[in-house]
Amino acid sequence: MARFVFITGGVVSSLGKGLASAALGALLQARGFSVRLRKLDPYLNVDPGTMSPFEHGEVFVTDDGAETDLDLGHYERFTGVPATKTDSISSGRIYTTVLEKERRGDYLGKTIQVIPHVTN
């Protein structure tokens, strides 16, 4: 049975949520658990690649070429599990996916709404 641990801290930056998550992941691994860390960001940018490093911090590039939050680098180094594009999700990426589906005609001309199109 899968178990999930969520670490939240609102939108306040530099609290150490990423390092705490990475450390907790390493501790869980040491106890024999399989660990996969994900980062969910509320910003509307698709990824942090074009964001100011002064505002957002450095970018970590995964092996599959995704430009992600530096926290994914911490996750990878602490746990030894390579981070991938699917480990970093932003609101902007979710909206981009929904809009691409709309342009392709996947919604058959229906009005796109947050519920159910974004939440599903």
Image: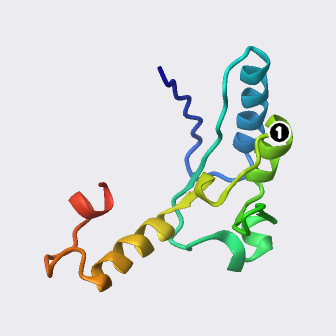
Q: Residue at x 72, y 16 (%)?
A: 32
Check disc 1 and report the residue beneath it: 80
Q: Which of 52 and 1 is in front in this view?
A: 1
Give the secondary structure at mark 1: loop
Color theme of the render: rainbow
Q: In this view, does 98 lie above or below 4?
A: below
> Looking at the image, is 51 positioned above or below residue 86?
below
| Towards the viewer: 93 or 84 | 84
Q: In this view, does 101 lie to the left or right of 7?
A: left
Residue 2 pos. (x, y %)? 49, 25
Label 1 packing within 10 angstroms: few (<14), some (14-19), many (20+): few
Above or below for 25 versus 92: above
Q: Quick one: which residue is furthest to the top in this view?
A: 31
Residue 114 image offset from top left, x and y in percent:
27, 64
Q: What residue type is labelled 1?
A: Gly
Taking the spot 69% from the left edge, 67% from the top edge, the residue there is 66
Q: Which residue lies furthest to the bottom in this view?
A: 103
What is the x, y in percent for residue 56?
72, 66
Residue found at x 74% / y 34% = 20
Q: Position of residue 98 (x, y in %)?
A: 35, 71
